[in-house]
Image (cartoon, rainbow, N blue to C red):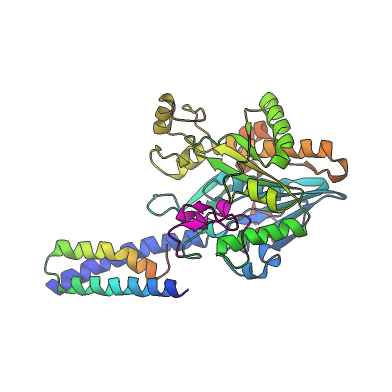
Amino acid sequence: MIITWLYYLLVAYVVVLMVWNLIRSRKWQEEVLYVVVLLPFVLRLLRLK
Amino acid sequence: MNTLRKTIIIALGLVLAAFAGISFRASRFLKEPVVAGPSVARVATLGEYFAPIKGTANDANVFFLEGAKPGGTVLVLGGTHPEEPAGRLTTWILAENAVLDQGRIIVLNSTNRSASTVTRPSGAYPATYTIKTDWGGQTFRMGDRWSNPLDQWPDPEVYIHYPSKQNLAYMDIRNLNRDWPGRPNGTLTEKTCYALIQLINKEAVDIVIDLHEAELQYPVISTIVAHPKGLDIAAMASMTLSDEEFKIGMEKSPAELRGLSHREIGDFTKAIPLLFESPEPFLDATRGRTDARLLLEGKDDFVVRAGKRGLLFEKIDAKGWPIDVRVGRHCSTLIQVLSVWSADHADKAVIMTGVPKYAEIIQKGVGAFLHDPAKSDPKKIYYE
């Protein structure tokens, strides 16, 4: 159970990092890439698999 | 401009996430109706045999089909590996159609229910499949070989089987057919096996039949795998079926490979375990497009080409291995095993009618034996 919570914390941390990079990005190609990569992380946080 | 562009891209991403999320959620929580047949005397849940399972994803329905005369008890497990649908569909036919004259049959349609709520990551599996019926069709969850990681996680680096301490592949700690005989303080899948062992002991089960399917590149295919206690039954059933209906082999459960139903149930209980395998091209590594059509029709040009190069352990041609053929094999094999057992054990006979054999299922289709829940007594409907 502890490992599971640590895992979700890690996923949330990666989501925050990617959103931060998305906000700072100036290239639309990179923004699309960040959003695509974010999808599975967001779904995992919502426990949808 | 920058903010507007980002907003649009994020909104498109959210739309994609919504589509994927809705699809995942719909298949995870899809309700599969079972219309309890004429011999279903009661429906329990697995949690009644081991309290820690109660309320979990694997608190599966347990259908008790009982005859008027006392006799033996046979447990039929469908959905040990839900991605092998012939096993689950056979249990549907049993639960909805079987008429018991003597003895009992206990049926689990979703032995590893958790595994039926997920598909293989990155496998591009269909979320569901539909069996055509006269009243439209019935949709089932596709499922996977392993328990849902949402229900059991994380996997270890190496899975050490209990109690043999044999080292197995890490993900097989979520494989119900590598976790027998289970343990009460283990993972969800191990606890499920432990609960099933309690059921087998408490209900004095004589024979356990575990229904599976296999890829054609796997040597254990079109066969009955038997614990040494059940070799005579498997041999007689295999010979009779091969002579009268279709070719099916028999194999002895290896003592060196642990965690499998056909080994551990025989070693740890008084029951005789048998495992049936039918061919499922959908599982072959060399398959083409992995969709519901391949799952149900069993036709694949790439698998046929593999066969032409001598890479398969079962024949395949353009006709493929349709689901009707695969379910028909399981039903006829079950009927034959009951016949062999009952002939040798009159006081523990299990006499069953109402279940179609191989030729009838091929002629009418599996859907002909699924009952319309909309036209059935609501009290007789149970959901998997």
Question: From the viewer's perspective, is residue B3 above or below residue B49?
Answer: below
Tell me the quarter of the picture where residue B23 sits: bottom left
Most frequent secondary structure within the magenta stretch: loop
Kindly identify the residue that appears in the image at 22 percent across and 66 percent down: B9
Magenta residues (range): B154-183
Q: Which of B162 and B321 is in front in this view?
A: B162
In the image, residue A19 lies at what x, y percent? 24, 73
Q: Residue B213 lies in magenta, yes or no?
A: no
Tell me the quarter of the picture where residue B188 sits: bottom right
Q: Is residue A21 visible?
A: yes
Q: Residue B173 lies in magenta, yes or no?
A: yes
Picture quarter with the N terminus of chain B: bottom left
Tell me the quarter of the picture where residue B156 sits: bottom left
In the image, residue B155 lies at what x, y percent? 45, 61
How many tags in the picture?
Answer: 0
Kindly identify the residue that appears in the image at 50 percent across and 37 percent down: B218
- Left or right: residue B80 compared with residue B146: right
Kindly identify the residue that appears in the image at 27 percent across and 62 percent down: A37
In the image, residue B143 lies at what x, y percent? 50, 53
In the image, residue B299 lies at what x, y percent? 46, 34
